[in-house]
Image: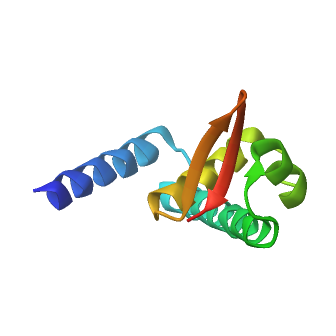
Amino acid sequence: MRLFMLKNIFFFFVFVDLYLNLPPLTKIKRDMIELIGTNAGLVWIALNEGGKMSVKAVKKATKIKADKDLYAAFGWLAKEGKLTFEEVEGDLLVALV
């Protein structure tokens, strides 16, 4: 059932893209997934080498410029169960599991 719903949602967006003359959804989605995956790799490497770090330190170590890109990478790794988060004195600390 869930796969059926996902297919319907996908086809709806493809139809809307074609109707509105927007660029294909698959190209945009592929580029976005590639960027998030690349940034997730950079975050993993930084945390593997540096251990538990603040978000600010991870951003500096990875040289990821946009906060949204950094948090998307955190989400990617968190969904895979590879990150832990801890708040200490107002700072968010991130570490590999």
Total numbered circles: 0
Query: Quick one: 2 or 19, which is closer to the camera?
Result: 2
Task: Using the image, determine if residue 43 lies above or below residue 18.
Answer: below
The structure residue drawn at horizontal position 61% and vertical position 52%, both measured from the top left corner, is 74
Q: Which of the 4 image quarters holds residue 50? A: bottom right
Q: Is residue 64 left or right of residue 3?
A: right
Residue 37 in picture, x, y percent from top left: 62, 66
Query: Quick one: 48 or 32, which is closer to the camera?
Result: 48
The structure residue drawn at horizontal position 49% and vertical position 54%, both measured from the top left corner, is 25
Q: Is residue 20 left or right of residue 51?
A: left
Q: Most extreme residue toward the left, as rendered?
A: 1
Q: How is the image coloured?
A: rainbow
Q: Is residue 24 visible?
A: no
Q: Is residue 57 left or right of residue 35?
A: right
Q: Is the N terminus in the top left, top right, bottom left or bottom right quadrant? A: bottom left
Query: Quick one: 26 or 1, which is closer to the camera?
Result: 1
Q: Which of the 4 image quarters holds residue 86? A: top right
Q: Is residue 15 left or right of residue 80?
A: left
Residue 72 in picture, x, y percent from top left: 61, 49
Query: Quick one: 95 or 73, which is closer to the camera?
Result: 95
Residue 22 in picture, x, y percent from top left: 54, 45
The structure residue drawn at horizontal position 46% and vertical position 63%, both measured from the top left corner, is 81
Task: Using the image, determine if residue 55 lies above or below residue 62.
Answer: above
Q: Is the C terminus in the top left, top right, bottom left or bottom right quadrant? A: bottom right
Residue 94 in picture, x, y percent from top left: 67, 51
